Amino acid sequence: MTDVFRKVSQAPTNPSRGEGTGARRAFDVADLYEGPLGGGGVAAPGREGGEGGGQGAAAAAAAVRPRLDEKLRQAYFWIVNSAILSPYYDIEYNGDPPAVLTFGDAKARVTLPTAQSYSSFVLLPLLNLAVRRRCLLVGGPGRGKTASAILMGVLAGYTLREIRRAIQHGQPQMTIADLLGNPLPKDLVNAESTDDIRVAWRKWLGMRVKIIDEYNRIPTRTQSALLTVMADNYAEVFDQVYECPDAAWYLTANDDAGGGTYDVIEALRDRIDVVVKALHFNARFLGELLERIEAGVKPEEIVPASIVFSPDELDRMEREVLAIAVPPEILRRIETFASQFELCEGAAAQFEYRTKDTLKLSGVDWHLVASAESGKDRVSDIGSTTKNGLSVRALMTALVFVKAMAYMRGDVRVSLEDVRQILPFVLHDKLVPDHDSPFFEADGNAPLRVDRISWIRKLFDLSCAQYDRQDLDRDDPVAALGAELRRGLEGVPEAEVRARLAKIERVLAEWSRARKLYGPTFDDVLALKSMHQRYTNYLRWLRWRA
């Protein structure tokens, strides 16, 4: 009976991407590593000589062994079919136009995707394993959060016994010594300095998968020690330091706000890269639970060996993910979206300081300043819906996870839909909503106060619509001026420098005639001011040299 539960989906799991059809995909990660003649280049990471250039035993091995992206998909489908029953395809992709139906008085929309789609509760932990970041699993007790994290540990090659012993269970009495390790008693008695004290480190610190169960029950002082491990990959006790390897982190919490026995310190919450919710159990699948009970099957005990990743494969998979390209036109849309949120005109007199971060640091009441911004349409202004902007860390994490999403789908370039689907999970705890914003009072927007995933996705859609209206793919003076500057200043004559300065000033003068200032224009003005300063400095140097 257990063989039924060990069955792995036959490759290719996504035939539409060109897998297993005998035809090479139009683009492949291996292309990034091939030599100029295609056959004798460097082997792609994880490909045992690449798909087209290997010979002999290496080529034969590559022919029967799935690529790492295919292995990742096989792991995903095994989990959703045989381990965690999650029949929720909330990350939707479409090839042909989908059928859309509405239900109930609220006209709730149900879309029937026409391309391979995914359950976020299974997909996001897997992507987190691939890129070794920090994932928070949120949901009520008994919804599979810890079970999902344990499965990730098994997929990383650990035994069930090792994983269970390594789980750190948050509880109010947890001390730093409980979390990290204890100094040896003999050394404490005999040591003449802290350098002489050895520490018996906890074994979980050296693992490539780290699980913190109910992290919001850990005392504040112990949270600070956990933060050091998460953020900087080292632990410190009695001046002794333990260097930790890169790892995929899985933290669990029972509520969305991160509350618990103790408030989670802001710096620790900020280190979490992606948040995924455990959805309810669909009672229609109770029969499958009964089958498991009768067969005595526990999914974490029967993970097929073919979908377990070796340490070398995990290293190579991360390199392959990072090799995925983000096309310039997609990056521009992410830039435009990210620039929507930071501007707060009433926060300062100096133009550069007119940000929400300045207001936050001042301690002045948020609504006292925000309400003073009159004249703007706060329903259509995307930036008015949040109390903060996006940090560098949040943006870097977003870029990594959209690459991972493209990799999961067998692509070598990030698509706009990859960004649209993944961005809300990365920014779930990064964007703080202003629930008093008129945006949430608009028709149909009230549920977005609660549903952060849909809220962020709608903001991204609105930002993209604004991008299209302004025709920024073809009419983007900042991009054109920036490309000109990136070609370098060496050999540029004084007359050309003056001409470029004049162009920058003309653009700024034209924008200054607009009555209202919005986030994207705020960032663009600062970018042009930066370019202007570089040209000004170069012009001064030219005069000195002359």
Image: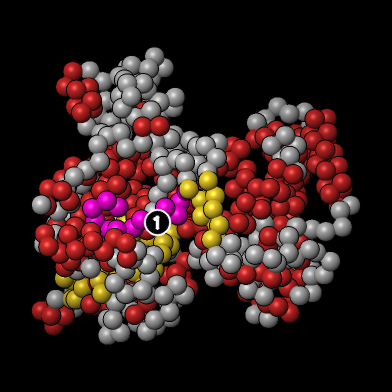
Q: Residue furthest top?
A: 37
Say whether residue 203 is left or right of residue 405: left
Q: Residue furthest right?
A: 513
How far from the left and from the top, in percent, is residue 287?
A: 23, 61
How far from the left and from the top, in percent, is residue 204?
A: 21, 64
Please give the range of residues in magenta: 80-92
Say whether residue 447 is left or right of residue 10: right
Residue type at mark 1 is Tyr
**Nearest to the observer: residue 342 or residue 440:** 440
Asked if residue 472 lies in the magenta stretch, the reply is no
Q: Which residue is mark 1?
A: 88
**Magenta stretch, main secondary structure class:** loop
Q: Quadrant of residue 70?
A: top left
Which quarter of the rendering shows the C terminus?
top right
Q: Quadrant of residue 403?
A: top left
Q: Is residue 266 above or below residue 377?
A: below
Q: Residue visible at 39% across and 14% down? A: 37
How far from the left and from the top, in percent, is residue 123?
A: 37, 52
Say whether residue 514 is left or right of residue 184: right
Q: Residue visible at 68% across and 48% down? A: 465
Asked if residue 89 lies in the magenta stretch, the reply is yes
Q: Residue visible at 40% across and 26% down? A: 25
Q: Is residue 439 above or below residue 469?
A: below
Q: Residues within 10 Å of mark 1 (few under 14, many from 20)?
A: some
Say whether residue 178 is left or right of residue 122: left
